[in-house]
Image (spheres, rainbow, N blue to C red):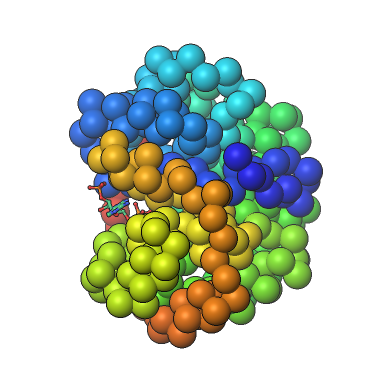
Amino acid sequence: MQTVRLNNGVEMPLLGFGVFQIPDAAECEQSVLEALRVGYRLIDTAAAYLNEEAVGRAIKKSGVPREELFITTKLWIQDAGFEPTKNAFEKSLRKLGQEYLDLYLIHQPFGDIYGSWRAMEDLYQAGRIKAIGVSNLLPDRLMDLIVHNQVVPAVNQIETHPFLQQVDTQQFLQQHGVQIESWGPFAQGRHDIFTNEVLLGIAAQHERTVSQVILRWLTQRGVVAIPKSVTPERIAENFQVFDFELSAADMTAIAALDTKASTVADFRDPAFVKWLGERKFEI
Ligand SMILES: NC(=O)c1ccc[n+]([C@@H]2O[C@H](COP(=O)([O-])OP(=O)(O)OC[C@H]3O[C@@H](n4cnc5c(N)ncnc54)[C@H](OP(=O)(O)O)[C@@H]3O)[C@@H](O)[C@H]2O)c1
């Protein structure tokens, strides 16, 4: 597995497995087990996905040595703030059955994320987390966090796919030593992405599938990708992306698909911010 080196020297797999919207515990456990069997080593979950226990069980059953794994989970908004973050971290760790995390992310840029960040800095300094980062921070918010704290986030996990390519943001993150990680690499299946003519054409040329072209395109750009699937054939398909290369012409053709617009969420829309902030989970 190819890796990227984070700003603190930690190696992070370039391709991983996401488990958003797999609420069924048995299905989640089975999917993670299958992903680990196929060879994925990065697993991306979150307290708000309500499946950390299932992920933990799959990890235990898999028998994969802990040092080979890269486990990410995320702090939800209702636990923002210094003390709540410390408690939420312990809870996530317990549910996952782990002694440490590889990456802990602030899931959403709302609530007292400064209190959260200081708690995460403490946990990081104490060696309980290998790297700490954020998710869904727009460049201005990220800069504010960097300027007023000690530890620069190692990762920013943001929506990134052929219709929202984040080219400028990737450049900005690179300049500040923050690794870009894509969520929703397939735009969650929206906008007929799997039957897009341009992507189908490139896939045909390489005798690959559209999903493989997308994941190759992301990883070739140095973007960490964490596709989700509960389908064993797709889990395997999505892992086979390091044995072919997209040409400069392929990359240019895909670049033309960028709409620079989200398919899911507008983090500057007050109605969305309110809706998200009011979502409470039984974490
Ligand atoms: N930080 C955040 O705010 C945030 C937000 C969203 C997601 N994420 C993370 O990013 C991960 C990935 O994003 P996502 O789950 O939202 O969406 P996604 O990976 O873009 O898309 C998942 C969808 O694509 C389908 N799919 C997967 N592989 C396929 C293939 N080879 N051919 C055809 N269809 C395929 C899946 O179907 P089946 O499952 O039915 O096979 C599922 O419907 C999440 O699981 C989560 O870990 C983070």
Q: Position of residue 32 (x, y in %)?
A: 37, 31
Q: Position of residue 7 (x, y in %)?
A: 76, 51
- Of residues 50 and 89, the one nearer the viewer is 50
**Residue at figure coordinates x 73%, y 40% from the top left:** 10
- Of residues 213 and 125, the one nearer the viewer is 213
- Of residues 85 and 12, the one nearer the viewer is 12
Q: Position of residue 279 (x, y in %)?
A: 29, 54
**Residue at figure coordinates x 39%, y 65% from the top left:** 203
In this rendering, position of residue 121 left or right of residue 33: right
Q: Position of residue 94 (x, y in %)?
A: 46, 22
> Is any atom of residue 81 visible in this view?
no
Quadrant housing the N terminus: top right
Q: Is 28 rendered above or below residue 6?
A: above
> Is any atom of residue 231 visible in this view?
yes
Q: Is 84 rendered above or below residue 141?
A: above
Kindly indicate the quadrant of the structure image that contains residue 83: top right
**Residue at figure coordinates x 33%, y 70% from the top left:** 200
Q: Is 38 rendered above or below residue 252?
A: above
In this rendering, position of residue 59 left or right of residue 68: left
Quadrant housing the C terminus: top left
Number of callouts: 0
Q: Is 60 rendered above or below residue 6?
A: above
Kindly indicate the quadrant of the structure image that contains residue 51: top left
**Residue at figure coordinates x 51%, y 75% from the top left:** 250
- Of residues 12 and 158, the one nearer the viewer is 12
